[in-house]
Amino acid sequence: MTVEELDAWRALPAKQQPNWPDQGELAAVRDRLATLPPLVVAPEVRILTERLAAVARGEAFLLQGGDCAETFAANTANKIRDKVKTLLQMAIVLTYGASVPVVKVARIAGQYAKPRSADIEASTGLPSYRGDAVNDIAATARARRPDPGRMLEAYHASAVALNLIRAFATGGFSDLSKVHEWNKAFVRDSAAGRRYEVMATDIERALSFMAACGIDLERTPTLHGVELFTSHEALLLDYERALTRKEDATGSIYDLSAHLLWIGERTRDLDGAHVDLMSRIGNPLGCKVGPKASPDEVLALADRLNPDHVPGRLTLITRMGAGRIRDVLPAIVEKVNSAGHPVVWSCDPMHGNTRDINGVKTRHFDDVLDEVLGFFEVHRQLGTHPGGIHIELTGDNVTECLGGGERIGEADLAGRYETACDPRLNTGQALELAFLVAEMLQQINVARSQGR
């Protein structure tokens, strides 16, 4: 592929791009980013495509989760550790429920830019905060001025996070027995967790059985470490293009800012810049699909983003809202599947269920759960594989989403509302969701075994 082909997006409409005030500074930052080492490497990207191909075949389950918007201030060892810990805890529960491997993809080490509904923030009259890679959340004119240099800071923050994540993934932190001990503590100490004591006990018996068979859980590589991949929304096109590289050995083109990139609901125009650039790279891709998307639109996107029908290449992340998913999703699934596209179907139950309470954005756990239930119901009716979930979560004990076993109410929202953008599930809510999804997956397994 020529440079001209790779840069064809520059002549196309590009939504959600910052109004950079200094084009010369932007060009200098682009040039600097293009000389820096990649954040991930091509062989890792290809491994993720293989893992997602197994999801598309119904042989694995995808867990994708992490912060709504990462911030430089929160890029600390403890916060990174707690996010990874929460994701691993969810994965253990889902692995048991699904009886298949769980592909773990974190929204981390790159989720520093966010789309916004308006260029100007209504409450302040200032330019909207677009993520730490663009401007600062402080409500001053100077802070909100888009600064290309922040993309360099985002790169370095991502590199630091990745270094620690790799250590957690391979250095014993993610040992299977250790992660299960964390879940046992959740079940023992949490009112919500006690509802899942039977499942936790079953997992404990499985681990004990493995030990009795002579399997050393601490020395078996697949039980002592994990594969953990990174992802973020491919929003800032100058950043993504600068980290797009050609692999010398194969001549293939990859965006090496992350293993998986996704295109958002606001930027998935078939003839837009985001779809064009992403269609030319070899990474596995995600594409968000909202309730207004028609089956023909989604099929056209699948044709454009995965014309060769490569398994694992494309994940369609539906974000319909609890009240719409059962009505809208079936026709989309039928249209795409009838065209032979081996996509991964994943459910984002967060973005379609946002509420505004006295000017504060929140989500209710019951709505999140109901959308996941609807997602599973649709795929069960169609005989297709509900391939995964895509969750905004944090490892902190925040009070941003209502409900759940902790019964967070409207009066509790101000207690620990810390998100830089959208409300996230806290650790307890995330684990509660994992146990509930595990129960759904078990029901599917039972139905399959009975030929239903």
Image: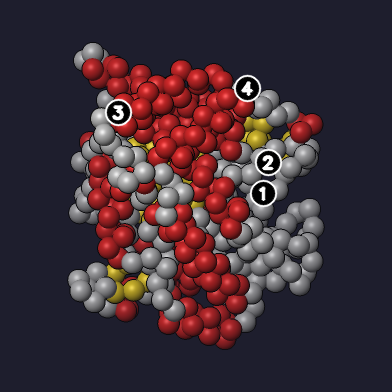
Image quarter in which the N terminus is found: bottom left
* Image position of 114 with respect to 329: above or below: below
x and y, in percent, of residue 47 in the image: 27, 55
Residue drawn at the location 53% of the way across and 81% of the way down: 29
| Kind of element beneath mark 3 | helix
Residue type of the residue flagged with mark 3: Ala
Occupied quadrant, residue 21: bottom right
Q: CA distance from mark 2 to mark 3?
A: 40 Å
Number of the front mark, 2 or 3: 3
Q: Nearer the viewer, mark 1 or mark 2?
A: 2
The residue singled out by tag 3 in the image is: 212
The image position of residue 420, as x and y in percent, is 67, 53
Residue under label 2, please give it.
Answer: 398
Question: How far separated are the C-alphas under marks 1 and 2?
Answer: 9 Å
- Other-residue count near label 3 (Cα within 10 Å), few / some / many at <14 / 14–19 / ≥20: few
The amino acid sitting under disc 2 is Val
Is disc 2 surrounded by few (<14), some (14 to 19) or many (20+) residues within 10 Å? many
Q: Cβ–Cβ below 8 Å for labels 1 and 2?
A: yes
The percent position of residue 292, horizontal first and vertical second, equals 47, 40
* Of pointers 4 and 2, the one earlier in the residue sequence: 4
Task: Using the rendered image of the protein, determine whether residue 313 is visible from the camera's viewpoint.
Answer: no
Q: Inspect the image, locate mark 1, and give the three-letter code of the amino acid beneath it.
A: Thr
Query: Could you tell me which residue is drawn at 76 percent across and 33 percent down?
Result: 412
Q: Earlier in the sequence, mark 4 or mark 1?
A: 4
Indicate which disc, 1 or 2, sits on the residue closer to the N terminus.
Answer: 2
4 vs 2, front mark:
4
* Mark-to-mark CA distance, 4 and 1: 25 Å
Residue highlighted by disc 4: 191
